[in-house]
Image: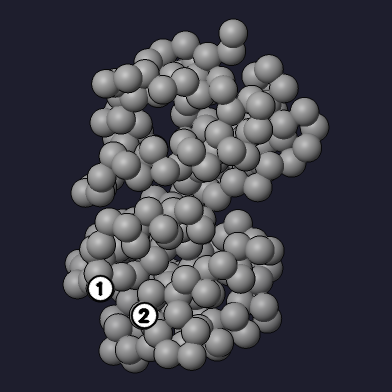
Amino acid sequence: MNSCILIVDDESRMRKLIKDFLQAKGYTILEAEDGEKALEVFSQNKNKIDLILLDVMMPKLDGWSVLRQIRQESKVPIIMLTARGEEQDELFGFELGVDEYISKPFSPKILVARVEAILKRANQDTKEIKEYAGIEIDKEGRTVKVDGKPLELSLREYELLVYLVENANIALSRDKILNNVWNYDYYGDSRTIDSHIKKIRHKLGKKGKYIQTMRGVGYKFEVK
Protein backbone atom coordinates (compact mmCIF):
# COMPACT_ATOMS: atom_id res chain seq x y z
CA MET A 1 0.00 0.00 0.00
CA ASN A 2 1.34 3.43 -0.93
CA SER A 3 2.14 5.72 1.95
CA CYS A 4 0.12 8.93 2.19
CA ILE A 5 1.96 12.19 2.91
CA LEU A 6 0.43 15.51 3.93
CA ILE A 7 2.38 18.55 2.66
CA VAL A 8 1.70 21.75 4.60
CA ASP A 9 3.25 24.93 3.16
CA ASP A 10 1.83 28.33 2.29
CA GLU A 11 3.96 28.56 -0.88
CA SER A 12 2.19 26.80 -3.75
CA ARG A 13 5.44 26.47 -5.72
CA MET A 14 7.09 24.70 -2.80
CA ARG A 15 4.12 22.33 -2.40
CA LYS A 16 4.20 21.52 -6.11
CA LEU A 17 7.95 20.88 -6.09
CA ILE A 18 7.69 18.46 -3.15
CA LYS A 19 4.51 16.87 -4.51
CA ASP A 20 6.04 16.18 -7.94
CA PHE A 21 9.09 14.45 -6.45
CA LEU A 22 7.10 12.36 -3.96
CA GLN A 23 4.40 11.38 -6.46
CA ALA A 24 7.16 10.20 -8.81
CA LYS A 25 8.14 7.79 -6.00
CA GLY A 26 4.58 6.49 -5.78
CA TYR A 27 3.39 8.35 -2.68
CA THR A 28 -0.18 9.59 -2.31
CA ILE A 29 -0.20 13.32 -1.55
CA LEU A 30 -2.57 15.56 0.41
CA GLU A 31 -1.98 19.32 0.64
CA ALA A 32 -2.77 22.23 2.93
CA GLU A 33 -1.83 25.88 2.40
CA ASP A 34 -2.02 27.04 6.03
CA GLY A 35 -2.15 25.72 9.58
CA GLU A 36 -5.94 25.75 9.94
CA LYS A 37 -6.39 23.82 6.70
CA ALA A 38 -3.69 21.36 7.82
CA LEU A 39 -5.64 20.46 10.96
CA GLU A 40 -8.83 20.11 8.93
CA VAL A 41 -7.19 17.79 6.37
CA PHE A 42 -5.48 15.80 9.14
CA SER A 43 -8.69 15.33 11.07
CA GLN A 44 -10.48 14.06 7.94
CA ASN A 45 -7.66 11.68 6.96
CA LYS A 46 -5.87 10.81 10.22
CA ASN A 47 -6.16 7.07 9.66
CA LYS A 48 -4.46 7.17 6.28
CA ILE A 49 -1.75 9.84 6.70
CA ASP A 50 1.64 8.17 7.28
CA LEU A 51 3.86 11.27 7.45
CA ILE A 52 3.52 15.08 7.55
CA LEU A 53 5.86 17.64 5.98
CA LEU A 54 5.11 20.78 7.96
CA ASP A 55 6.33 24.31 7.26
CA VAL A 56 7.07 26.45 10.32
CA MET A 57 6.20 29.96 9.13
CA MET A 58 2.59 30.06 7.89
CA PRO A 59 -0.43 32.37 8.06
CA LYS A 60 -3.43 31.74 10.36
CA LEU A 61 -1.66 29.08 12.42
CA ASP A 62 2.08 28.42 12.43
CA GLY A 63 3.76 25.03 12.25
CA TRP A 64 4.42 24.86 16.00
CA SER A 65 0.71 25.29 16.80
CA VAL A 66 -0.23 22.62 14.25
CA LEU A 67 2.42 20.28 15.66
CA ARG A 68 1.18 20.75 19.24
CA GLN A 69 -2.41 19.95 18.29
CA ILE A 70 -1.54 16.90 16.21
CA ARG A 71 0.75 15.54 18.94
CA GLN A 72 -2.16 15.58 21.39
CA GLU A 73 -3.74 12.73 19.47
CA SER A 74 -1.19 11.20 17.10
CA LYS A 75 2.40 9.96 16.89
CA VAL A 76 2.46 10.25 13.08
CA PRO A 77 6.04 11.09 11.95
CA ILE A 78 6.46 14.84 11.32
CA ILE A 79 9.28 16.52 9.38
CA MET A 80 9.48 20.29 9.89
CA LEU A 81 10.47 22.47 6.95
CA THR A 82 12.23 25.56 8.23
CA ALA A 83 13.88 28.52 6.58
CA ARG A 84 15.72 29.25 9.79
CA GLY A 85 18.45 26.94 10.98
CA GLU A 86 18.31 28.37 14.47
CA GLU A 87 19.46 25.88 17.05
CA GLN A 88 16.96 26.91 19.72
CA ASP A 89 14.12 26.43 17.23
CA GLU A 90 15.27 22.88 16.53
CA LEU A 91 15.56 22.01 20.22
CA PHE A 92 12.16 23.61 20.85
CA GLY A 93 10.69 21.49 18.06
CA PHE A 94 12.19 18.27 19.37
CA GLU A 95 10.67 19.06 22.77
CA LEU A 96 7.28 19.24 21.04
CA GLY A 97 7.80 15.94 19.23
CA VAL A 98 9.32 16.75 15.83
CA ASP A 99 10.93 13.68 14.22
CA GLU A 100 13.19 15.45 11.75
CA TYR A 101 14.18 18.85 10.36
CA ILE A 102 14.94 19.90 6.80
CA SER A 103 16.16 23.45 6.25
CA LYS A 104 15.13 25.43 3.19
CA PRO A 105 16.49 25.56 0.58
CA PHE A 106 16.93 21.80 0.32
CA SER A 107 17.64 19.25 -2.38
CA PRO A 108 14.43 17.39 -3.30
CA LYS A 109 16.48 14.19 -3.50
CA ILE A 110 17.56 14.61 0.12
CA LEU A 111 13.97 15.29 1.12
CA VAL A 112 12.82 12.08 -0.60
CA ALA A 113 15.66 10.11 1.04
CA ARG A 114 14.69 11.36 4.49
CA VAL A 115 11.00 10.68 3.92
CA GLU A 116 11.83 7.13 2.81
CA ALA A 117 14.13 6.55 5.79
CA ILE A 118 11.57 7.73 8.34
CA LEU A 119 8.72 5.74 6.78
CA LYS A 120 10.89 2.64 6.62
CA ARG A 121 11.71 2.89 10.31
CA ALA A 122 8.14 3.73 11.29
CA ASN A 123 6.86 0.69 9.39
CA GLN A 124 9.43 -1.84 10.56
CA ASP A 125 7.59 -5.03 11.36
CA THR A 126 9.64 -6.95 13.89
CA LYS A 127 7.55 -9.16 16.13
CA GLU A 128 9.40 -8.70 19.32
CA ILE A 129 8.58 -7.68 22.86
CA LYS A 130 11.42 -7.17 25.29
CA GLU A 131 11.33 -6.18 28.92
CA TYR A 132 14.07 -4.34 30.80
CA ALA A 133 13.45 -3.84 34.52
CA GLY A 134 9.79 -2.94 34.04
CA ILE A 135 10.34 -1.10 30.73
CA GLU A 136 8.53 -3.15 28.07
CA ILE A 137 9.32 -2.47 24.42
CA ASP A 138 7.02 -3.86 21.72
CA LYS A 139 8.90 -3.44 18.44
CA GLU A 140 6.00 -4.58 16.29
CA GLY A 141 3.58 -2.06 17.75
CA ARG A 142 6.37 0.50 18.31
CA THR A 143 5.11 1.05 21.84
CA VAL A 144 6.73 1.29 25.26
CA LYS A 145 5.14 0.53 28.62
CA VAL A 146 6.55 1.28 32.04
CA ASP A 147 5.19 -1.05 34.73
CA GLY A 148 2.29 -1.80 32.38
CA LYS A 149 1.43 1.84 31.66
CA PRO A 150 1.81 3.06 28.04
CA LEU A 151 4.40 5.78 27.42
CA GLU A 152 3.81 8.54 24.88
CA LEU A 153 7.02 8.83 22.85
CA SER A 154 7.75 10.50 19.52
CA LEU A 155 9.31 8.29 16.83
CA ARG A 156 12.77 9.73 17.56
CA GLU A 157 12.43 9.32 21.34
CA TYR A 158 11.32 5.73 20.81
CA GLU A 159 14.28 4.95 18.53
CA LEU A 160 16.74 6.55 20.94
CA LEU A 161 15.38 4.58 23.91
CA VAL A 162 15.47 1.32 21.92
CA TYR A 163 19.06 2.00 20.86
CA LEU A 164 20.12 2.64 24.46
CA VAL A 165 18.44 -0.44 25.92
CA GLU A 166 19.62 -2.72 23.12
CA ASN A 167 23.16 -1.59 23.95
CA ALA A 168 22.70 -1.86 27.71
CA ASN A 169 25.84 -1.49 29.85
CA ILE A 170 27.80 0.03 26.94
CA ALA A 171 28.94 3.65 27.10
CA LEU A 172 27.69 5.25 23.88
CA SER A 173 29.26 8.45 22.59
CA ARG A 174 27.04 11.23 21.27
CA ASP A 175 28.58 10.73 17.81
CA LYS A 176 27.73 7.05 17.89
CA ILE A 177 24.16 7.83 18.93
CA LEU A 178 23.82 10.43 16.14
CA ASN A 179 25.15 7.96 13.56
CA ASN A 180 22.83 5.17 14.64
CA VAL A 181 19.62 6.98 15.56
CA TRP A 182 19.90 10.00 13.29
CA ASN A 183 21.48 7.74 10.71
CA TYR A 184 22.03 10.01 7.72
CA ASP A 185 23.42 13.48 7.03
CA TYR A 186 22.49 15.08 10.29
CA TYR A 187 24.32 18.36 10.65
CA GLY A 188 22.78 19.34 13.94
CA ASP A 189 24.25 19.75 17.34
CA SER A 190 24.80 16.92 19.82
CA ARG A 191 22.66 18.96 22.25
CA THR A 192 19.74 17.57 20.26
CA ILE A 193 20.53 14.22 21.93
CA ASP A 194 20.70 15.82 25.39
CA SER A 195 17.29 17.39 24.81
CA HIS A 196 15.80 14.00 23.84
CA ILE A 197 17.45 12.19 26.77
CA LYS A 198 16.04 14.77 29.19
CA LYS A 199 12.55 14.22 27.83
CA ILE A 200 12.83 10.41 27.87
CA ARG A 201 14.11 10.42 31.46
CA HIS A 202 11.18 12.60 32.50
CA LYS A 203 8.70 10.25 30.83
CA LEU A 204 10.31 7.16 32.40
CA GLY A 205 9.87 8.67 35.86
CA LYS A 206 11.86 6.76 38.49
CA LYS A 207 13.29 4.49 35.81
CA GLY A 208 14.85 7.50 34.09
CA LYS A 209 17.88 6.94 36.36
CA TYR A 210 18.77 3.88 34.26
CA ILE A 211 19.94 6.27 31.52
CA GLN A 212 23.25 7.42 32.94
CA THR A 213 25.30 10.37 31.76
CA MET A 214 28.90 9.36 31.05
CA ARG A 215 30.81 12.60 31.48
CA GLY A 216 32.87 13.53 28.44
CA VAL A 217 31.50 10.52 26.53
CA GLY A 218 27.74 10.29 26.20
CA TYR A 219 25.17 7.97 27.77
CA LYS A 220 24.71 4.43 29.02
CA PHE A 221 21.60 2.40 29.87
CA GLU A 222 22.32 0.34 32.95
CA VAL A 223 19.99 -1.28 35.46
CA LYS A 224 21.63 -1.46 38.85
Locate residue 172 relative to residue 168 in the image: left or right.
left
Q: Which mark is residue 172?
A: none
Asked whether 70 or 30 is in front, the reply is 70
Q: Residue 95: x, y in percent?
A: 48, 53
Q: CA distance from mark 1 to mark 2?
A: 8 Å
Which amino acid type corresponds to the residue marked 1 in the rendered image?
Ala
Location of residue 80 with respect to 87 vertically, above or below: below
Location of residue 8 with respect to 127 vertically, above or below: below
Q: Residue 145: x, y in percent?
A: 72, 35
Contact flag, marks 1 and 2 (Cβ < 8 Å): yes
Mark 1 residue element: loop
N-terminal of the pair, mark 1 or mark 2, is: 2
Location of residue 32 with respect to 55 vertically, above or below: below
Question: Badge 1 local density, few (<14 within 10 Å), some, or many (20+)?
Answer: some
Q: Quadrant of the N terminus?
A: bottom right
**Which residue position holds label 2?**
57
Q: Residue at x 36, y 18 (%)?
A: 214
Q: Residue 114: x, y in percent?
A: 34, 56
**Which residue position holds label 1?**
83
The structure's colour scheme is one colour
Q: Would residue 140 be visible to someone looking at this image?
A: no
Question: Badge 2 local density, few (<14 within 10 Å), some, or many (20+)?
Answer: some
